[in-house]
Image: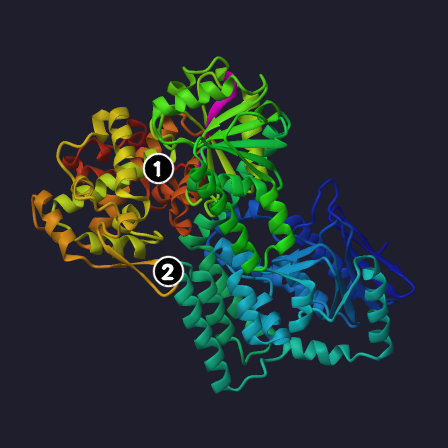
Amino acid sequence: MLYEGSKLTVTVDGGIAVLCFDARDESVNKFDEATMAELGEAGEALAGASNINGLLVTSAKPAFIVGADIMEFGARFQKPEDELRAGMAESVSVFNTIEDLDFPSVTAINGMALGGGLEMCLSTDYRVMGQSAQLGFPETRLGIYPGFGGTVRAPRLIGADNAIEWIADGKNRDANKALAVGMVDAVVADDDLEAAARDLLAKAIEGEFDWQARRAEKTGPLKLNQTEAAMVFETSKGYVMGQTQGHYPAPIEAIQRMAQAAHMGRDEALKVESEGFVKVAKSPEAAALIQLFLNDQLIKKKGKKYAKVAHEVKQAAVLGAGIMGGGIAYQSAYKGVATLMKDIKEDAIDQGLEEAAKHFAKGVERGKLDNREMAEGMSRIRPTLSYAEFDHVDAVIEAVVENPKVKKSVLAETEERVSEQTILASNTSSISIDELATALKRPGNFLGMHFFNPVHRMPLVEVIRGKATSEEAVATVVDFAHKLGKTPIVVNDCPGFLVNRILFPYFFGFQQLIADGADFAKIDKVMEKFGWPMGPAYLSDVVGMDTSQHVEEVLAAGYPDRMKADEKSSLDVMVENNRLGQKTGSGYYKYEKDKKGKPKRASDPQAYELIASVQRDDQDFEADEIIDRMMIPMIIEAARALEEGIAETPNEVDMGLIMGLGFPPFRGGALKYADAQGLATVCDKADRHARLGKLYQPTERMREMAANNETYYRMS
């Protein structure tokens, strides 16, 4: 044994050193500080040994190395720039030591080698990959980029254009794609991986492969002249900027650093990489995106706890076909769950089946399914006009019209036809779960399961716990949501639940701006530039004015102190004139179909004429003013919901907004955005707009946090 640590070992046999990553008492290998320290020690031991002819790098885990330990990022990135830069230089030197050994080296890649794991692979001369393995640089999804030599070694190995694509999009690649670009030297069956890697190493030792020439290529400058380099990097930068709208600085910074280092040797290029890495690591976008990853981990951890209590849903049912019911039935069937779809009308059943068939057909078009899989999926949906088979159903999702009387009637009727263990869930977007539960004999089996539209695209499901809802019911629906490929967030019952409740104050800010004379099209442009996928006017048109008005009425009744409008709004005017948005062809904008049959928005003078009737002023607003008036009430309502325990953690509040509304991910959610500004700043801005009403009034807890310089998220 040449080296033994708790994260990795080095053994030597017959002149071959085997460096094996095998983190003790952990399910995966990752590059935490302890692993990096041990790799440094192992590298020194290898460099100092005299009886070694070659190095084989392996992993004893199902995955090679899944990347860096993101749990350490918070504390590490809070360090002063000089300290962070010094730490990066130390880590980079560890990989250089492996790369500079006086003998050839080969990595056997099993499972996944991501981020720092892939950079470890790049430090050796050759790579052999198992057929089922995957490679990738996911760092840009966290607001950073590869910092252990990835932006230096990858372009020299696979070409600048390929390296930019791999690094900028953050996606994983399978073995065939990795081989096609030259990221690996061979792909073999998983069972043959180590034998194949040893064979390649033996041939390199014997001189059949020129490992020194390979290493020189990897450590020298890029083989592009100035003109070629300029074309590759500038074209790529323009494309990525178009894709990200400038909201995600990491991929752009990575491209710029690769361009700057293109004609440098390894050591100089690594310094350029580290400078850029420190810059993006200290950015607010990185802080937000890393927190999102941690939020997701928290929700998954909670999901595992619920899974221990849950009853498996093998047979589901949807009440109410149509577009929403068909969408839910599709998602359930697509994920392998047999699903009854019930309605009282044949035409609604037909519409639901058409909706499901449409999504399956798109899956075939995109190559995600074949025709046999589509047929199997559709066969899992069984349409019915009766309750004949409901006695064997594990969970029923009610998706009938958004009317409390109708829902109560349908739920009570269904309860009589199912077993005492069957869970009933309502897909209501705003009606009180406790109110609906009054119609039931077994309220412990009842809760909300709010899908967002379109069901197949939106990742969030709000699981709404009523006062009588049992833990088993919550656990079963959470587990079922996971089975459907969704992210469930458990919230307590209140008007609008979590997401719609926090969205309304945002729309209130929009209506107040219009009343004060703002141009809705300008507001849309400002908020889209802020990072929202749609501005508030366009979103209203897509959702439907009547739908928005209904939710507004529910929330106004639930929170009359701050959400009840005192005057007619532009939304009311639109509904009065049957301008309900895309569904009627006009709203704030008018709509005509493009070549693909999709509605395309255009300006409509008539909308401005109608809105003028509710405008009390004619002001023009700067972008910062628009953003503050839109976002401050949203932040305050998010804080209220958290303080009231509607959601348990700020993590779940923010994930709900990002996954349910499309809140800009790079801003991290309303509460993370508040942290980034500082609560003192948020409160000051709110006070400047106090005349607009209670939605702009911070809570006492917010003021207390501001005075004490506290944040919603722990700043390590």
Magenta stretch prevailing secondary structure: strand
Residue for badge 2: 597
Residue 94 visible: no
Q: Amino acid at mark 2?
A: Gly
Element marked by disc 1: loop
Q: Amino acid at mark 1?
A: Asn
Colour scheme in the image? rainbow
Instruction: Estimate the x, y position of residue 584 in percent, counting from the top left.
Output: 26, 49
Quadrant containing the N terminus is: bottom right
The residue that appears at 30% across and 35% down in the rendered structure is 636
Quarter of the image for residue 280 reads bottom left
Residue for badge 1: 709
Residue 445 on the magenta segment? yes
Residue 577 visible: yes
Instruction: Estimate the x, y position of residue 40 in percent, counting from the top left.
Output: 70, 58
Element marked by disc 2: loop
Instruction: Estimate the x, y position of residue 621 in percent, counting from the top left.
Output: 16, 52
Q: Which mark is residue 80?
A: none
The residue that appears at 40% across and 20% down in the rendered structure is 409
Along the line of sight, the residue nearer the viewer: 545 or 511: 545
Looking at the image, residue 609 sits to the left or right of residue 162; the answer is left
Tell me the mark number nearer the camera, choosing from 1 and 2: 2
Along the line of sight, the residue nearer the viewer: 507 or 50: 507
Cα–Cα span, label 1 and label 2: 52 Å
Q: Which residues are magenta?
A: 444-452
Looking at the image, residue 485 sits to the left or right of residue 183; the answer is left
Quarter of the image for residue 682 reads top left
The residue that appears at 68% across and 79% down in the rendered structure is 216
